[in-house]
Image (cartoon, rainbow, N blue to C red):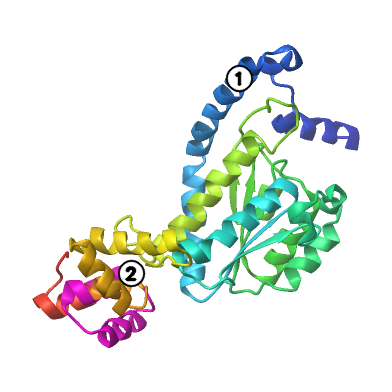
Amino acid sequence: MTRRTIMKNIDKNMITEQRNKRSEKLDTFTVEEIIRVMNKEDQTVAASVEKSLPQLRKAIERIVDVVKNGGKLYYVGAGTSGRLGILDASECPPTFGVEPTLVNGIIAGSDKAIRTAIENAEDDEHAGIRDVESVVTDRDAVVGITSSGRTPYVIGGIKKAKAIGAVTVGLSCNPDAELSRHVQFPIEVPVGPEVVTGSTRLKAGTAQKMVLNMISTTVMIKLGKVYGNLMVNMQATNEKLRRRVVHIIKEATGVNEEIAQKLNDEAKGDARTAILMITFEIPYKKAVETLREVNDHFPEAMKKLSKGKFGRDHIV
């Protein structure tokens, strides 16, 4: 088989680069027609993501193991994919109260590329190798993100991560992606041709955002950063979030506003500590010590204290 034939076959699988028949006359559409066709196309993204859930489950379970054992999570991408990785990573500390170094985004072109498009940066495979090599260890997990599935920067980074011994995951939006051949856990979400041909910030970007939401949120839940569906570990860094913490305390314990505010103040704004103090009628120091003993896994802290209070496992 000649190289020309090989490239032709590869391009045939690049559905993100194909023309969308439903939007071929897009420039003649009215505003309403444009947004309707975009909305209709967007509705197909969730179904595409659903088909990838078995692949996604395996990847997340392995990432959870990595993080529980002291490893870190890295996203590696270029352009929109890289920015989405950085967005997801940057939202973990305020939402789940984790260290900023636990989930990290690496983007082709460095931090400047977050705001400014540096399109040729994605072609530098050696830069991907260098960027990953400078931070990743064999204890970590690396998720390569590329709509096409063949971005050189991402491929280089993933190859290096694999050589180092890190867990490798590949997220792409084309079937039979090159990236999938270099990772332990391939996740392919073929969303089909874009409304604007090749503009993968659209459906492909939406699919990637959905998958990254699932990865980081599920990992944090399994680390004990959520209780029920409450963000008990969030950082209250402004007035809106301080009010939210009080509301979380009320929801988790059933106390009124006044008591929730009082215990929130005593707990220094930490919803977890306040909930433990209220639920088990214990002092601040005991609540903090319990959280430390279970490595800040809040549901485990609840379970530990419930055993002491009720003499057996008890769902509070």
N-terminal of the pair, mark 2 or mark 1, is: 1
Q: Does 154 sit left or right of 270 as displayed?
A: right
> SS for tag 1?
helix
Tell me the magenta residue range.
277-302
Q: Where is residue 181 in the image (x, y as percent from the top left)?
A: 68, 50
Q: Name the residue under label 2.
A: 271
Q: Mark 1 points at which residue?
A: 37
Q: How far apart are marks 2 and 1 (CA)?
A: 44 Å
Quadrant containing the N terminus in the rendered view? top right
- Label drawn at residue 212: none
Task: Give the vertical position of 71 relative to 126 (above or below).
Answer: below
The answer to whether any part of residue 239 appears in the image is yes
Task: Give the vertical position of 79 relative to 174 (above or below).
Answer: below
Task: Give the vertical position of 107 relative to 65 (above or below).
Answer: above
Q: Residue at x 77, y 48 (%)?
A: 151
Q: Where is residue 83 in the image (x, y as percent from the top left)?
A: 68, 52
Between 68 and 268, the one nearer to me in the picture: 268
Q: Does the magenta stretch include residue 271?
A: no
